[in-house]
Image (spheres, grey):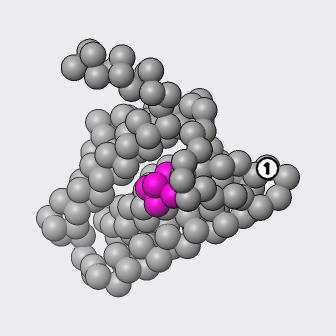
Amino acid sequence: MNKKIVHVLLPALLGLTLLPVRAAHGQYQAQGEYADVRSQDYLRDVVALASTLGSAHAIRVLCNGRNDQYWRSYMQELLGLEAPYQGRLRSSMVDAFNSAYSAEAARRNSCDAGAVSAEKVYASTGERLANSLVQANLPEAARRSGEDND
């Protein structure tokens, strides 16, 4: 529905995997062979992004039918990039997506102007969260040079 925001969201998500992970107070230790360290703020935001995608997906399915997997495909991409292996982070992201989907599906029973507007808000929120995740993981020097360009 809002293709401009979507074209910005995917590159931002893809950019997350290209950045070095910055350790912070309150670290999260993934289980297993592929463990890495991520800040609690990062975990909060990536789970919030998964939740936002779940809400948007519920509206998209309501308005366009079950064959429209637009936002779900973004969630699959996010999982592949940020939590490709079984573990707490992946489980938290999937649970957040599914819970938000269920809550939004229970809240709405028709695709009206309010639903279309809500999907746009979710898309905008998702874009903000993705950009926040990218900014939080940029090295300090890169953040300062970006501020110089403003």
Q: Is 63 placed above or below 125 here? A: below
Q: Is 74 placed above or below 88 here? A: above
Q: Position of residue 30 (x, y in %)?
A: 71, 58
Task: State left or right for residue 62 relative to residue 94.
Answer: left
Question: Label 1: which residue?
Answer: 34
Given residues 143 and 104, the one toward you in this image is: 143
Q: Position of residue 26 (x, y in %)?
A: 55, 59
For the magenta stretch, what is the residue range? Answer: 40-46
Residue 79 among magenta residues: no
Q: Secondary structure at mark 1?
A: loop
Q: Residue at x 49, y 37 (%)?
A: 137
Q: Position of residue 24 (x, y in %)?
A: 54, 48
Q: Main secondary structure of the magenta part?
A: helix
Given residues 119 and 64, the one toward you in this image is: 119
Residue 43 among magenta residues: yes
Q: Is residue 73 visible?
A: no
Furthest residue toward front: 25
Furthest residue toward right: 33
Q: Is residue 44 visible?
A: yes
Q: Residue at x 30, y 57 (%)?
A: 122
Q: Is 116 placed above or below 124 here? A: below
Q: Amino acid at mark 1?
A: Tyr
Q: Quadrant of the C terminus?
A: top left
Q: Dot 1, crowdedness within 10 Å: few (<14), some or many (≥20)?
A: few
Q: Position of residue 39 (x, y in %)?
A: 54, 52
